[in-house]
Image: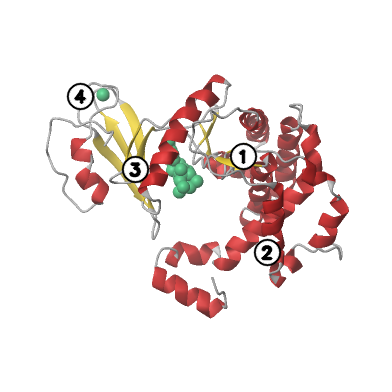
Amino acid sequence: MIFTKANSNEILSGDVSQWTKSLLPTLCCPSGCNKQMQLTQFISRKNCNIYFYNIGCENCRKSYCVKQVLNLKKDKVNQLFIKGKTLYSILAVSGVHSTEFIAHDEHTNSVLMPSITGDTLEKLIIQSFFKGEKSHLKCLNLLAALADQQAIMHATKIPDNLPMPTPCSNLEYENRLAEYLDIGFIQQALTFAEETPQQKIAALGESFKEGMENVLLHGDFQAKNVLIDKHNSAVLIDLNYGLGHPLFDIAQFLTQLVRLHRTWNFPKAKSYLEQYGDHFLKVYFSHGNEHLKKDLPFFMLWAMAFSLRGDLTMPAFVKRYIGSHIKASVMYKKWAGISQ
Ligand SMILES: Nc1ncnc2c1ncn2[C@@H]1O[C@H](COP(=O)(O)OP(=O)(O)O)[C@@H](O)[C@H]1O
Ligand SMILES: [Mg+2]
Ligand SMILES: [Zn+2]
């Protein structure tokens, strides 16, 4: 256990969760002042295997946040912590802001991070649809800064001793896309102007396979996973730290971005989102990486198919209710005719 022990043994009342019961009474302030941490907020999303705790030290007036991931195995949490701790420092030196991992506890599958005060980039983008020109400009600037950061992250050299997963090759991406396209509904959804996705890929030629890039990826890069802090810096959260093609991140980001206008159908939403996407791409590709542009159509298809595949297994509105109930999930899939 890496969290340090505090002097007090007071046990919290109320059934919050295993974590608060077992860990909080023994958790003292990481800045070394030896005061016991206080629970300020407990966030549990319904039927979700992830819990968030906001905790603080009254003495230092600092806030921290604990993410408890019950659906990850202990060794995965350990690996995530080691990667997070090392890569945080490397990225910070090159100007990429991400969340620091202060400590972790393998008995409760939790990591301790500083709490960042601010909204997600997604929220600021949605607000810009009705908040006026100033907020629109702010989003454009934030997206430019984020694109710079992401290009830097994609050019980061990873130390050899880190427990990174096997890099995903372009061939694997292709095979996975072919699997998704086997599902008739996805094939249909991605057929535009009578051109099937397979025809689109064939038209790309062989050149997009040449650039076998193996770079450090965010892994779940989307505006939801970016917090804008009090200095107006874009801070990356929820990093998965994978290895693969950089446009995996970029295409995922753009796909989730354009989807916003369906949920937030304000008059300006569509044109603003187009501008945001274009601006982000322009800045991203201004880092001596223009050669990657040719791979974008492939990865956009990939990201869209991946997103549709996820919705097909269980649409978001169903997932919210029965996502972690195994019995109900199995019944739902049976009803929907999905074998996996
Ligand atoms: N370090 C942090 N400081 C403050 N809030 C955070 C922090 N990390 C996460 N959050 C809050 O929790 C939400 C979900 O966090 P995230 O790590 O993306 O979890 P999930 O894996 O469920 O997507 C974020 O949108 C943000 O509001
Ligand atoms: Mg997230
Ligand atoms: Zn303290």
Question: Of helix, strand and loop, which one carries label 1?
Answer: helix
Element carrying mark 4: loop
- Residue carrying label 4: 34
Rounded to the nearest angstrom, the CA distance separating label 2 from label 4 is: 54 Å
Q: Is residue 52 left or right of residue 217?
A: left
Marked residue nearer the N-terminal end (2 or 4): 4
To which residue does mark 3 refer? 110
Q: CA distance from mark 1 to mark 3?
A: 38 Å
* Local SS, label 3: strand
Task: Give the residue at mark 2.
Answer: 179
Res 231 visible: no
Q: Horizontal placement of 27 versus 299: left or right? A: left
Of badges 2 and 1, the one in the foreground is 2
Percent coordinates x, y for residue 101 in the rendering = 40, 32
Q: Are marks 2 and 4 in contact (CB under 8 Å)?
A: no
- Label 3: how many residues lie within 10 Å, few (<14), some (14-19) or many (20+)? many
Q: Is the shortest distance between ligand 3 and the CB of mark 4 under 8 Å? A: yes
Tell which circle, 4 or 3, labels the residue nearer the N-terminal end: 4
Tell me: residue 269, above or below residue 313. above
Q: CA distance from mark 1 to mark 4?
A: 45 Å
Examine the image and state in which quarter residue 247 appears.
top right
- Using the numbered discs, state the Cα–Cα distance from disc 2 to disc 1 in whole angstroms: 42 Å
| Kind of residue at disc 1 | Lys
Picture quadrant where residue 31 is located: top left
Residue 247 visible, this orientation:
yes
Quadrant (top left/top right/bottom left/bottom right) for the N terminus: top left
Q: Circle 1 sits on which residue?
A: 131
Does label 1 or label 3 sit earlier along the sequence?
A: 3
